[in-house]
Image (cartoon, grey):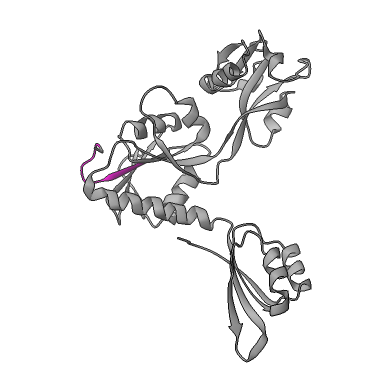
Amino acid sequence: MSTVQGRLRIAVQKSGRLADRSLDLVRDAGLRVVKGNNDLLYRVENYPIDLLRVRDDDIPTFVADGVCDLGIVGENVLEEARNGGPRAEVVMPLGFGRCTLKIAAPPTLAYDGPASLEGLRIATSYPTVLRRWLDERNVRAEIVTMRGAVEVAPRLRLAAAICDLVSTGATLEANGLGPHDTVLDSQAVLIRSPVAAEPSLRPLLDSVVDRMAGVVSSQGAKYVMLNAPRSALDRITAILPGAGSPTVMPLSGRDDAVAVHAVCQEAVFWETLEKLKAAGASAILVLPIEKMM
């Protein structure tokens, strides 16, 4: 059972790279968040839901143990917290907070694959993930656990290489390091507790998950409307990015042309519009999608 009777709890990062985007997702799902008397607990005024704002590495435990019903956390944190105990269920990837956990090293280390790390010291903030990756490749190396500034370890001779999160690569470059093998690709995910919520709250829990899925589905999606000659319909449909099966409707007073409506899950660039026009499309409109279920 959830620890707070009659209320759902959602764990989100209090501060850090996922904090603002997590709150945006909650609000876009129609939950009106109100700050509480302390910075730990926010309330949702239109539903019996609390937001618990905590350290990111506490979120997997809170959700797995049933302290919270849902959580938003990076896959890197979730994988680091993985052990033999109860585990939270990954409901869906959320499409933001993308980063990569990589092996990086100075040019003095002639890196030629994981075997190059044999017998060396590797600094990281993710010792569990790194140890699993090394064991899968039968590489024996010493792991030096650091909680910050991992990239300085080679310069301070604490380690020969590092395993750290990379987004742009600028921090690695500034410290004279080059990226090599990928240990883990990560993004924010929605996780759900294996501990069942109160029966009266389960419909609300399912509704929140469905709403968040709708928000994620609409991210970057566009609604495209155009007119097309019937003879060019197959060519035009093939050009529409990620459209699946578009809706085709007759145009009033015209037997040779149709209206085409499509939800495009991929980006619609100017080049896409030019290709559609060259294929015979006209009156092309591209509209943003706010919500989709």
Is residue 227 at least partly visible in the picture? yes
Q: Quadrant location of residue 3?
A: top left
Q: Nearer the viewer, residue 132 or 77?
A: 132
Q: Position of residue 187 (x, y in %)?
A: 55, 39
Image height of 90 relative to 227, above or below: above
- The reply to whether the magenta stretch includes residue 200 is no
Q: Quadrant location of residue 191?
A: top left
- The reply to whether the magenta stretch includes residue 6 is yes
For the N terminus, give its image quadrant.
top left
Q: Main secondary structure of the magenta part?
A: loop
User: Residue at 71% of width from left, 64% of height from top?
Assistant: 239
Q: Nearer the viewer, residue 239 or 169?
A: 239
Side (left or right) of 149 relative to 217:
right
Q: Quadrant location of residue 258?
A: bottom right
Q: Position of residue 40 (x, y in %)?
A: 35, 38
Q: Nearer the viewer, residue 156 or 60?
A: 60
Image height of 240 relative to 200, above or below: below
Is residue 155 at least partly visible in the picture? no
Please provide the residue range marked out in magenta: 3-10
User: Residue at 58% of width from left, 40% of height from top?
Assistant: 98
Q: Position of residue 152 (x, y in %)?
A: 65, 19
Image height of 77 relative to 251, above or below: above
Q: Position of residue 178 (x, y in %)?
A: 74, 25
User: Residue at 33% of width from left, 36% of height from top?
Assistant: 194
For the C terminus, give its image quadrant.
bottom left
Instruction: State how many labels appear.
Output: 0
